[in-house]
């Protein structure tokens, strides 16, 4: 070990995605040695994608004899492996669904090395010295309900070159009888929970993500986000992502006493419950927000970093939800505007009026861009798949901003009707005859798309989405 003293911390990737080898600084003298086996701040700041995986349990497996052989077990949690004393030959096999299923990596580990093993990668080792203490941190507590995946140590496809022949070492009967690779059922990804699955965005998310055993699409009927029993409603450690597409969106009704209560319950109380669950279980929380968090007085597009200043109850609840989600360690907040999807919306209303021969008056002093739910779903999936930096992103259609009256005229035109039938009026004129509460609207709803475009995602031009809607 003396030759290893004083080296710098280095981190190396492997052919198995997420499997990361660490060379650890070991300090010692004639009395012995010392190392920082897991130092969160230093190790997550190496520049390599070593996650802050949140260990909750530390285990030690002590092995008396040379040649003790264990594995290959893939567990539904992340593992950080090292050796306190002795030396091992380690072998790891990717047993996750995907292109790298069956990939193998081997290396020797002594007290100066560690390896981060992501969920679903099979882990095994063979001791090369007596009295070897094999240690590992895990980010979930053992559970009899957990799902494991196993591979036979002698699998011919993996073809692991064990330094000590397997027929000469002690192996448990369980390990001897694990399946060959061709018979292994790959470990599915961590689960995704989608709330509000029957809404316009929820339906677009289903189309984008598809139906898979590891995706739960839920509605209030099967998962009440305001229930005090929510923390026990799922085994949350099995989930990697919660996509919160549920929201109270009736902006005018939110100004009534009952509406205010309902809006705060759905947009704040429920969001706080999800945020608590996400934080406690290391889950990525994706939250969909709104241009209504701004007062619309800014000249030019709103950036994600602009201070919020909501005008009405709906906007206040969305701003409060954003603030809650922002403190979840792993979060994406997607702010959007003027949403159009599969359900009642402004475009459908204009089409109906055009077809019925009605000439509408439409507000011409509110400016923004239409956002189709297909773009929100695509952008959301893009952020997750790219592991984009956590934070706030604006997602709207791209192109030149328009007023509602201009959008209405365009709808008339693309459906073969005379756009001159649309008359523009001010917001005050439009609501002059209203009998119930009217929520204040931001006059400027244009959101800056720079942050999400920097990740490689480019929203569709709103005009193109509108034309495509009527050409399909």
Image: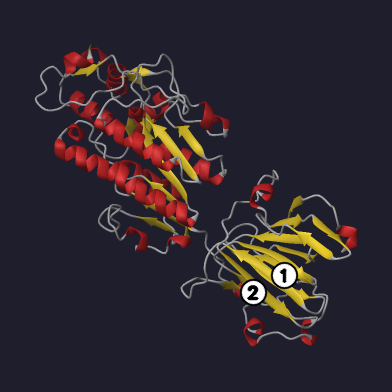
Real-space CA distance between mark 2 and mark 1, rounded to the nearest whole angstrom = 9 Å
Is residue 388 visible to us here?
A: yes
**Camera-side residue: 104 or 310?**
310
Q: In the figure, 287 relative to 118: above or below?
A: above
SS at mark 1 in the image: loop
- Residue at coordinates 65% horizontally, 51% vertically from top-left? 50
Q: Quadrant of residue 16?
A: bottom right
Residue 151 numbered tag: 2
Q: Is residue 366 left or right of residue 28?
A: left
- Residue at coordinates 65% horizontally, 76% vertically from top-left? 180
Q: Is residue 30 left or right of residue 130?
A: right
Image location (x, y in percent) of residue 2 = 89, 61
Which residue occupies the extreme front position in the image?
Answer: 31
Image location (x, y in percent) of residue 335 = 41, 33
SS at mark 2 in the image: loop
Question: Residue at label 1?
Answer: 158
């Amino acid at each position: 070990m003396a030759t290893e003293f004083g080296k710098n911390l280095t981190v190396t990737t492997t052919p198995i995605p997420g499997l990361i080898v660490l060379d650890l600084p070991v300090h010692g003298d004639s009395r012995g040695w010392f190392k920082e086996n897991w130092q969160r701040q230093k190790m997550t700041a190496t520049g390599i994608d070593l996650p802050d995986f949140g260990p909750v349990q530390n285990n030690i497996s002590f092995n008396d004899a040379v040649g003790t052989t264990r594995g290959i077990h893939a567990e539904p949690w992340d593992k950080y492996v090292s050796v306190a004393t002795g030396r091992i030959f380690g072998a790891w096999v990717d047993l996750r669904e995907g292109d790298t299923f069956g990939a193998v990596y081997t290396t020797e580990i002594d007290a100066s090395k560690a390896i981060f093993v992501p969920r679903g990668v099979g882990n095994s080792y063979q001791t090369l010295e007596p009295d070897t203490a094999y240690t590992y941190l895990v980010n979930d507590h053992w559970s009899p309900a957990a799902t494991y995946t196993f591979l036979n140590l002698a699998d011919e496809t993996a073809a692991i070159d064990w330094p000590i022949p397997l027929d000469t070492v002690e192996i448990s009967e369980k390990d001897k009888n694990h399946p060959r690779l061709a018979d292994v059922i790959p470990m599915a990804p961590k689960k995704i929970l989608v709330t509000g699955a029957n809404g316009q965005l929820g339906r677009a998310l289903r189309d984008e993500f598809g139906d898979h055993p590891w995706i739960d699409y839920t509605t209030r009927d099967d998962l009440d986000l305001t229930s005090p029993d929510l923390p026990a409603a799922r085994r949350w450690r099995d989930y990697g992502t919660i996509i919160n597409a549920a929201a109270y969106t009736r902006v005018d009704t939110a100004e009534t006493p009952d509406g205010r209560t309902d809006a705060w319950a759905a947009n704040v109380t429920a969001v706080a419950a999800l945020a608590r669950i996400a934080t406690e279980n290391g889950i990525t929380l994706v939250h969909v927000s709104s241009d209504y968090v701004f007062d619309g007085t800014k000249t030019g597009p709103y950036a994600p970093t602009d201070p919020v200043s909501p005008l009405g109850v709906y906007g206040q609840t969305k701003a409060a939800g954003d603030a809650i989600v922002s403190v979840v360690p792993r979060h994406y907040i997607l702010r959007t505007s003027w949403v159009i999807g599969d359900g009642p919306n402004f475009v459908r209303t204009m089409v109906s009026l055009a077809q019925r021969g009605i000439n509408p008056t439409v507000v011409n002093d509110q400016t923004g861009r239409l956002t189709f739910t297909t773009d929100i779903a695509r952008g959301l999936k893009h952020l997750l798949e790219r592991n984009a930096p956590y934070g706030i992103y604006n997602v709207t259609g791209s192109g030149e901003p328009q007023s509602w009256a201009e959008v209405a005229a365009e709808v008339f035109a693309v459906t073969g009707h005379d756009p001159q039938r649309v008359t523009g009026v001010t917001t005050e004129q439009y609501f002059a005859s209203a009998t119930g509460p009217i929520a204040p609207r931001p006059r400027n709803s244009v959101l800056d798309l720079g942050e999400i475009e920097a990740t490689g995602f480019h929203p569709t031009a709103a005009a193109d989405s509108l034309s495509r809607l009527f050409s399909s």
